[in-house]
């Protein structure tokens, strides 16, 4: 399996090699991680980011929704999205 295949399967929540996923981030690290993701889009390192689920529930109405909106994400019917145009 190539690195690209592994990244793609990880993005879908599939664990192709049975290694397990790391534990959840500590609460103090979550705002930093969200800001880093938004920065990647703003700086052109990622063309677009869509977040549909957070902690197994919908991103819309999540406790993290306000922080994502403050970072420039836009609400949609099922997900919050950020692209370079609205970053």
Image (spheres, helix red, strand yellow):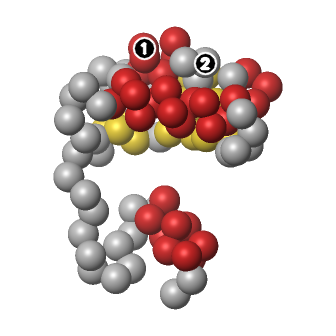
Which residue matches tag 2? 72
Mark 1 → mark 2, Cα distance in angstroms: 10 Å
Q: Position of residue 25 (x, y in %)?
A: 25, 41
Q: Which image quadrant: the C terminus?
A: top right
Q: Residues within 10 Å of mark 1 (few under 14, many from 20)?
A: few
Q: On residue 66, which mark appears? A: 1
Name the outermost residue toward the right. 85
Q: On residue 40, which mark appears? A: none
Lateral position of residue 80 relative to residue 83, left or right: left
- Residue 68 versus residue 57: which sits nearer the camera? 68
- Point 68% across, 45% down: residue: 46
Q: Position of residue 57 (x, y in %)?
A: 31, 38
Find residue 82 and report its image quarter. top right
Give the vertical position of 69 relative to 62 (above or below): above
Q: Position of residue 23 (x, y in %)?
A: 20, 52
Lateral position of residue 52 relative to residue 44, left or right: left
């Amino acid at each position: 399996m190539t690195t690209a295949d592994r990244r793609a399967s990880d993005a879908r929540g599939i664990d192709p090699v049975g290694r397990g996923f790391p534990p959840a981030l500590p609460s103090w690290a979550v705002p930093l991680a969200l800001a880093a993701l938004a920065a990647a889009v703003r700086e052109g390192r990622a063309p677009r980011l869509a977040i549909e689920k957070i902690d197994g529930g919908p991103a819309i109405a999540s406790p993290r929704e306000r922080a994502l909106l403050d970072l420039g994400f836009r609400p949609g019917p099922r997900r919050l999205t950020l692209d370079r145009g609205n970053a």
